[in-house]
Amino acid sequence: MTAVAEKAQAAGATAADTSKKPWALLTTPLVALAAGGALTLYLTQTNLTATQRETLSPSALAEAVVQHLELTLVSTVIVLAIAIPVGILLSRKGARMATPVVLALANIGQGAPAIGVIALLAVWLGIGFWTAIVSLSVYSILPALRNTLVGLQQVDPALVDAGRGIGMSAPAVLFRVELPLAIPVILAGIRTTLVLNVGIAALAAFIGAGGLGNLVVTGVKLYEFPVLVTGSVLIAILALLVDWVAAIAERYLHPKGVLPMRGAKAVVTLALAAMVTACGLEPASQFIPEVKAGPELDEFDSLNGATIVTTSKDFTEQLILGKILTLVLSAKGAEVVDNTNAKGSVNARESLLRGDADLMWEYTGTGWVNYLGHVDGDPGPDGKPVELSDADQVFKAVAIEDLEENGIFWSKPAPFNNTYAIAMTEADSKRLGVTTLDDIANVPTEEQTFCLENEFESRSDGWRGMKEAYRLDIPSSNVSIMDAGIVYSEVGGRCVFGEVFDTDGRILANNLVTLEDNKGYFPIYEPSVTIRESINKEYPQIAEMFEKIGAELSTDVMRELNSRVDVDGENPVKVAEDWLLKEGFLKQPD
Amino acid sequence: MSETTAPAEADGRGAEIELRGVTKRYPGQKKPAVDNVNLTIPDGEIVMLVGPSGCGKTTTMRMINRLIEPSGGEILIGGEDVRKKDPNELRRHIGYVIQAGGLFPHMSVADNVALVPRMLKWQGSRVSERVDEMLSLVGLEPSQFADRYPRQLSGGQQQRVGVARALAADPPVLLMDEPFGAVDPITRAHLQDELLSLQDELSKTIVFVTHDFDEAVKLGDRIAILAQGSEIVQYDEPASILARPANDFVRGFIGEGGAMKLLNVTRLADIELADVVATRPGEDAARVLAEVSEKETPWAVVLDESDRPVRWVSRDALTEVSGDIGESGDEVTATINGRSTVREALEVLLKSDAECVPVTVRRKYVGSVTLATVQHAINQLRERAKGGGRA
């Protein structure tokens, strides 16, 4: 090549694309580096609990990143293997008719909420890595397919005509003219797919496929801000870097002599990561049926003129309990804002602390261990050690300390204990001779398989503590992490053992038995209505009412109510209303 | 006609194309797009297919290289039926030029030109030699243009590369589909001139589709004027069509100023020029004066030793000179080439105040042109056309 030609080519290139300045490509890694640095600094400056230190250890993070990348790359490869050939086929003359149909199908994949696609496929295919891969592929096939199609369609038909006219065969025109000219658009589609998949892969945590989404989900549910931040920032960094690598690939694969196109920016990614992080932080107010207070509540003063905000966490039992709050308060004349169904423990509790909500049902063990940060044997307010398996001690300790420190009043707890439990099928229990947690150690290692919910796996009073207490040595390959609802159906299938809530209705429905916590490891989780102190002072009858109502909520009652929602598919509001009516706390409006 | 300057070699550097009853029907359309076309395109000629848009002229052309398959009829190139050949192989031996050249933007100029030779499996060294040769042929310096990309060329340059690519494998036949439609008028005129001089050298059989009648007149050895269904309304040499349009459709197509267009296609070399006395500086003035007096024109033109016209001497000037003519008279300010059209001569006459302009061929004096010459030429062209003969 002559110097003149080289110069001409270089001139053409520079004029066309300012981003070809060498420093422009360095921006993204520098931003990623800065974000990584800031994250490291933040983590070193923060007092992390032992659990958090373990969750955020370099090896754990590396594993999550690798899992996340696996999810992203495998799904992207699958998407490309499908989208590019299909895109090519659709761009051929004969297939024009099929194009709208295929695009409509691909649109459905993307139009449906990602979490919905994942959940649907989990129902159909079961949970785990490959379901996540299929979901991601279904979700992100559209950009790659559409860009392949559009990329090929935007090739000037005159060039195809010219190619055929000088004697190139149809495949030669495709491979030597159309595809090279479509490459910038196709690459942009691949880039979008990759970045989209980095973001969506976070949702894979819900069906036990791991990845950085675990950190985000854990962070949200447990109010572990450092974990949440680490997960979100790492996803964002990953997205930035993947986008960057794709940008480099775009540059080097870009056909020479063709003007570069304006690429999508990584801003999309950041927005996406932020979205995943933020989803569910905003609970929605919901429909409340019109009800009147029943005879059992006559003794309490009315709440006319009071405006009260209720909240709850996002699982069945909490929904039912939350609706009980809402129904009873409005029956007694209060103006109720129903902010129940906040995602995870964090958000409901946080809104109570901020004053955005006034009351919620909280579990004594959760308050003492997770919110107030105590471990078994820590001294209580009276200086004596508090044993987590002693319901009375835990309640007294948390009631005093939370009122002092956070201005949260704890009413007398209801008599059921929604603690964690390990469940197995009745058949397995008989076959393996396991009835207590101690017996697990005697089961052959290959049968020591566990399905755990994300929150349990990572909370300090959960999995780690249980393994220590019962001296279990279970390889991590035996453990699958998934959303709580799925565990019940996976026990006896994917896993021999599953972590459940003791009051869950599906224990009965699925013929599961729970193992006896013979060492008293699991903390007591008795539900108490936690109320902001100012509200409690103004309306002391609220706590009194719910102490009376709570007294009727035994473990059996709770299991039954939960079962009506989880097994029979009834609406939590309806279930709560029925029970309150039956017990005489409400009566039908005239 | 332009033919007069072309070497007389219709000797098979091109190939005759014959369309026999060629028809193209599209499913779902009542009328055929091309209906029973019979057309013979002589070896080595440029035949222009002209017609309104949608008349089927492009379809007709694209059936020759089977970009469109005919529904019926036969197409022969050099006596061989195109439908008996593999379409891709067939097209590799037919040059194809479209608007803006149809260059592939992701390939360098050299790669674009080398496409067909490479498909024909020419050896690498032969291909690169050929690329340089072709670029030089269309007036692009290979060392400067070979490695550029189409985007870095002007419209005219791109079109030249398009022609170079079409000619690279030395096909006998060239199909050109409105190739100069996308360039500005000045560049278009240049490209047209270049195509004509290329054709002088190469003598390909060229089928050229255009909707621009003036382009057809300028470039065509013959023009086929097509109506709907590719019906051939008139097929003749440009001057004949201009002088004697077959019907109102053709007349409408020629448009206003048919006579002027006729002047456009008639070259000075082909008409009868004014008989003006030519003389030399060494001639005796009195003798020349006597000669001039016998003619209608009151001047003589003085030629130098290379027969180039240098001065005019009028009768009055000659009377004042005794002995040799020498340096007397006025300098010749304008001459015109014999290849110029009559219309160009008319313009020169009107622009300069000269009543008479000398005509040269290879710089040598061949005669002169005056307004009377032009008028006479028009009359003659009309006469010939009426007689049914070709101009």
Image: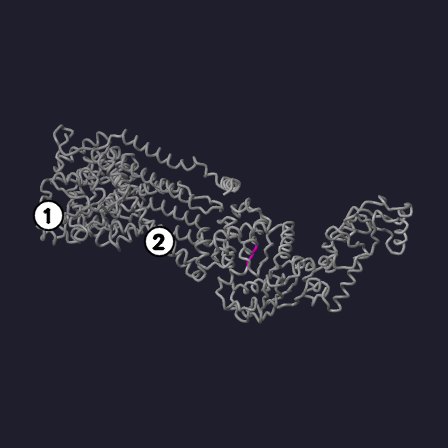
A581, A448: nearer the viewer = A448
Q: Assign a secondary structure to mark 2.
A: helix
Which residue is painted at 61% across and 57% down in the image? B202
Q: Report the chain holding disc 1.
A: A
The picture places residue B7, in percent across and down from the top left corner, at: 66, 59
Which residue is painted at 65% across and 68% down in the image? B233
Q: Report the chain holding disc 2.
A: A
Kindly report the secondary structure that dominates the magenta region of the rendered protein: strand
Eye-nearest disc, 2 or 1? 2
Q: Does the magenta run of residues contain A500?
A: no
Q: Amino acid at mark 1?
A: Val
Image marks 2 and 1: residues in contact by CB distance under 8 Å: no
Badge 1, how many Cα within 10 Å: few under 14, some, many 20+?
few
Badge 2, how many Cα within 10 Å: few under 14, some, many 20+?
few
Image side of residue A505 versus residue A133, left or right: left
Would you say residue A425 is visible in this rendering?
Answer: yes
Q: Does the magenta run of residues contain B96?
A: yes
The picture places residue A267, in percent across and down from the top left corner, at: 40, 40
Q: Amino acid at mark 2?
A: Ala
A453, B154: nearer the viewer = B154
The picture places residue A218, in percent across and down from the top left corner, at: 25, 40
Q: Which residue is mark 1?
A: A443
Q: Which residues are magenta?
A: B95-99
Q: Earlier in the sequence, mark 2 or mark 1?
A: 2
Would you say residue A333 is visible in this rendering?
Answer: no
A62, B140: nearer the viewer = B140
Q: Image height check: is B45 above or below B350?
A: below
Q: CA distance from mark 2 to mark 1?
A: 43 Å
Q: Which residue is mark 2?
A: A81
The picture places residue A349, in percent across and down from the top left corner, at: 26, 37
The numbered dot on residue A520 is none
- Give the quarter of the figure containing the N terminus of chain B: bottom right
